[in-house]
Image (spheres, grey):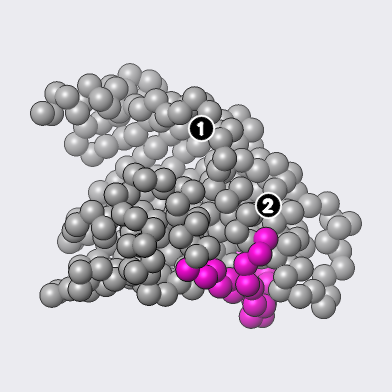
Amino acid sequence: MDKRILALTAMGIIFVLIFSGCMGEQKGVLPKEEVSSTIGLTAEQIRDKSIEAMDNVHSYAFDMDIKMSIEEQGMRSMDMTGNGRVDIKNKRMHSKIDVGMMGMTISTETYLIDNMQYIMLPTMGWVKNETEANIWEKENLVKSQKDLMEGIEVKLLGSENINGIDCYIIEMKPNKEEILQLFGQQMGDTSGISSAEIGEMIRSTELKEWIAKDTFLVRRSMADMQMETKGKTLNIEMTIDIYDYNKDMNIELPEEAKNAQDIEDVMKSEI
């Protein structure tokens, strides 16, 4: 898989995380009295109320299911399933991810405590990596989500019950310029691919969100993306469920991870 496909895969994952609100600093839940009357709301009003509600969250949990396939001479696929808990207030995060490919499953576990990241790798054990000192305060994915959603075209598709909660179904339709602006903010120049090249690769992007009728918090995000490069088509289907808003997450680093090796030292020893 060349670097263009790898970069686009990463961008697809970022795209859904941005809209689902699964990363970034958030602050409390919209008071009940502000959401008691929701009859006759337009798609734009639901979108705006959701932006306001998601700005008031300090912790949450999520489950995700990502399916990726590459169409070339043969079909190759990769499935990712996982779950996580994020405590913005106390600067702690924990996630577990299983990656299935070619009949094999690789499992990883990650903690973020303040600005130190700890990762359990199948072949190396626990390693650690110091992130930017301001990782929890810097301009984040949720801010980008809000900036983009404020003017994005939306359509109300109907209603559905998600895990016992009545939700509006909103379809979002970002144009190519908005997508490129979003990716540029989050990935910078690290992908090695220019905005013009990305624009040529994107074939279609569809996104839906399930927004709770009582709190306007996002309960589910789904995305379907298709990109093409060098005769290869990359399809990404992603579903993220978000729950346990503003609950105590009790995220503690396990004892075995406290002795993690610095990832740079590990990589040097592998050379």
Q: Is residue 218 shown to the viewer in this render?
A: yes
Q: Amino acid at mark 2?
A: Met
Q: Indicate which disc, 1 or 2, sits on the residue closer to the N terminus.
A: 2
Whole-angstrom CA distance, mark 1 to mark 2, is 19 Å
Disc number placed over residue 135 in the picture, else none: 1
Q: Is residue 247 shown to the viewer in this render?
A: no
Instruction: Decide whether residue 154 is among the magenta residues.
Output: yes
The x, y position of residue 154, in whole percent, is 64, 73
The x, y position of residue 234, in whole percent, is 29, 68
Q: Quick one: which residue is furthest to the left in this view?
A: 271
- Give the side of residue 159 with respect to residue 209, left or right: right
Residue at 41 percent across and 52 percent down: it is 82
Instruction: Decide whether residue 226 is among the magenta residues.
Output: no
- Give the side of residue 209 with respect to residue 150, left or right: left
Residue at 64 percent across and 33 percent down: it is 89
Q: Is 228 in front, or is 32? A: 228
Residue at 34 percent across and 55 percent down: it is 194
Whether residues under marks 1 and 2 lie with C-beta atoms below 8 angstroms apart, the answer is no
- Give the side of residue 235 with respect to residue 173, left or right: left
Q: Amino acid at mark 1?
A: Ile
Q: Is 231 in front, or is 95? A: 231
Q: Foreground mark, 1 or 2?
A: 1
Q: Quick one: which residue is furthest to the front in this view?
A: 196
Above or below, 243 relative to 42: above
Disc number placed over residue 54 in the picture, else none: 2
The span shown in magenta is 150-176
Q: Quick one: which residue is furthest to the top in this view?
A: 259
The x, y position of residue 51, in whole percent, is 69, 56
Looking at the rendered structure, the secondary structure element under dot 1 is loop
